[in-house]
Image: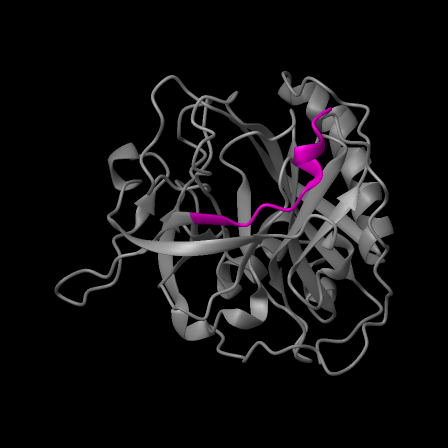
Amino acid sequence: MATAAVQTPQIPSTFTPQALNPATSTSSSASRNKPRDVETTLHYYKPNADGSPPHPTYTDRPETYHRPSEEHSITVRDVRGQDGEFTLDKNGFQFYGHTSAEKDFADDEHIKAVYYPETEELLKKATGASRIFIFDHTIRRQPSSPPPPSTSTADPAAPQLRGPVQRVHIDQSYKAALSRVPHHLPEDAEKLLKSRVQIINVWRPIKTVLRDPLAVAEANSVNDDSLVVTELIYPNRRGETLAVKYDEGHRWFYKSHLTPEEVLFIKCFDSKLDGRARRVPHTAFAVPGTEGEENRESIEVRALVFHEDESLE
């Protein structure tokens, strides 16, 4: 796994990020517009007692999805009112106002026909990318029995009703992220890998989030030493995700009461090696006092994002 240090960028991006578009809140309560930092518990990677690496996850063997975790008390800061200050290249995540034509997110084929093209255009506008390839999506609707904290976000064999994942993780390792280019675009891979490649998760609420929001850890607060490669074995190929070890220096953020007219861009990977943010851990978390609120519903779309006019350095 690559070990390039992640630092606050010292050089400007070749593309100026778009400011957050205003999004109309669906809440009529004035209190929901006030920032609310949350003291909560996050679930981190728990090392094996014998020092061995984490066991692989097999997509066709559900019993391998579960693994122990460490609980740590964390303050998650609410960016409400300051969300425009956070960008993909500086912090590794970005909030962006956008109203989708898709509302129900109930039919996969309709999502692919309508929401995928819409998301491609959104990513091009927000990042300045020359090419987008969406390779999967996940809808999160809380099942009747919540999954354990260690359930993987990247398990395509898991039940269709998948609730929020309360485990700190990154969807792809550096190696696995790059391997997706030849896997999905074999004819163009050699050319595409010579320029900048990103994987971005476009996370959108289906309803205003009243419980179990998503938190992201600012990229430059998480060293590569905190990341633990976990093999993800598909029937026809091998991938990797990243578990995350606890460090008191991690800085966590979220935006309270995120609406369907807002998306959160999560940078899972960036091949650019000039010091800008390359990846951010994320996790769902519990907000004390919201246990009786409506369950969270959301969709996340993961895409390869190409900047064919940018070098790797």
55 displayed left or right of 98: left
Is residue 241 in sight in this rendering?
no
Is residue 127 in sight in this rendering?
yes
Residue 302 % position (x, y): 63, 44
Residue 225 % position (x, y): 40, 74
- Residues rendered magenta in the picture: 28-39
Residue 101 % position (x, y): 82, 24
* Residue at image location 41% in from the left, 47% down from the top: 40
Q: Is residue 198 magenta?
A: no
As rendered, which of 234 and 121 lies closer to the eye?
Answer: 121
* Residue at image location 65% in from the left, 28% down from the top: 208
301 displayed left or right of 166: right
As rendered, which of 309 and 222 lies closer to the eye?
Answer: 222
Counting the numbered discs, the total is 0
Say which quarter of the image contains residue 242. bottom left
Quadrant location, the C terminus: bottom right
* Residue at image location 44% in from the left, 53% down from the top: 169
132 displayed left or right of 256: right
As rendered, which of 194 and 42 lies closer to the eye?
Answer: 42
Quadrant location, the N terminus: bottom left
